[in-house]
Image (cartoon, rainbow, N blue to C red):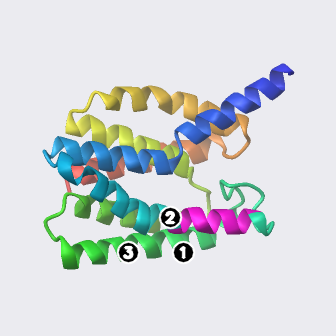
């Protein structure tokens, strides 16, 4: 195995481990436990997986299999419109469900902030493709830090490694990563200080 091949493989693994789906699950799980609602852990993670993660995962599989996307990251700007449509719609459905069934849920504020973040990213994509990996990881690091979770330091340490990964895989430019970092931090702060 060549050095280039090894580097690319490592970069792919970093992108998988720090995938937005993993970051979302980490925030939901940690926030649920920190709120003293450990009994709701499976329910909360399951609800977010059903409403927000599953539709995007199914879209990704469909788009890659039919050759509409070059890779699972929807790396080309024109691939992002359907990604954002599904992500915004499914997150809006989650927000509506929570408003009707669980208006006091700890998930509601995070879901509303995530919805706003997705809308902002979708609008910005007309000019620059925001790194959703970096956005999700920065949001997670910030939110966990504000929750007082020691996991925040691990996620924070992953941020530069994730940036290296996205650059190595040629998925993003430094500006796209920096924008994702800034938006993620702002969203994490909005979860705590609306």
What range is drawn magenta here?
A: 55-64
- N-term-proximal mark, 1 vs 2: 2
Percent position of residue 6, x then y: 77, 24
- N-term-proximal mark, 1 vs 3: 1
Distance Cα–Cα, label 1 vs label 3: 10 Å
- Which residue occupies 26% across, 50% down? 41
Judged from this view, the residue extending furthest toward the right is: 2
Instruction: Judge the density around disc 2: few (<14), some (14-19), many (≥20) Cα neighbours within 10 Å.
Output: some
Is the Cβ of the residue at disc 1 closer than 8 Å to that at disc 2?
A: no
Q: Nearer the viewer, residue 113 or 182?
A: 113
User: Which of pointers 1 and 2 indicates the residue nearer the eye?
Assistant: 2
Distance Cα–Cα, label 3 vs label 2: 14 Å
Q: Quadrant of residue 173?
A: top right
Quadrant where the N terminus sits is: top right
Instruction: Judge the density around disc 1: few (<14), some (14-19), many (≥20) Cα neighbours within 10 Å.
Output: some
Quadrant where the C terminus sits is: bottom left
Distance Cα–Cα, label 1 vs label 2: 14 Å
Q: Nearer the viewer, residue 98 or 77?
A: 98
Residue 85's mark? 1
Which residue does the numbered mark 3 point to in the structure image? 92
- N-term-proximal mark, 3 vs 2: 2
Viewer can see residue 78: no
Tell me the SS state at disc 1.
helix
Residue 54's mark? 2
Residue 168's mark? none
Percent position of residue 4, x then y: 82, 25
User: For residue 72: magenta?
Assistant: no
Tell me the SS state at disc 3.
helix
């Amino acid at each position: 195995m060549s050095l280039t091949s090894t580097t690319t493989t490592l970069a792919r693994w970093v992108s998988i481990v720090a995938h937005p789906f993993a970051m979302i699950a980490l925030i939901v799980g940690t926030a649920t436990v920190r709120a003293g609602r450990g009994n709701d852990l499976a329910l909360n993670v399951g609800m977010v997986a059903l409403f927000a993660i599953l539709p995007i995962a199914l879209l990704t599989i469909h788009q890659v299999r039919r050759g509409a996307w070059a890779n699972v990251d929807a790396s080309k700007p024109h691939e992002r419109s359907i990604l954002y449509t599904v992500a915004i719609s499914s997150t809006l459905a989650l927000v509506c469900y929570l408003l009707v069934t669980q208006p006091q849920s700890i998930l509601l504020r995070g879901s509303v902030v995530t919805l706003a973040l997705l809308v902002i990213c979708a609008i910005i994509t007309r000019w620059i493709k925001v790194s959703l990996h970096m956005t999700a990881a920065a949001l997670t690091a910030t939110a966990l830090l504000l929750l007082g979770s020691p996991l925040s330091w691990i996620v924070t340490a992953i941020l530069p490694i994730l940036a290296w990964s996205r650059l190595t895989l040629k998925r993003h430019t430094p500006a796209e990563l920096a924008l994702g970092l800034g938006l993620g931090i702002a969203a994490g702060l909005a979860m705590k200080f609306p």
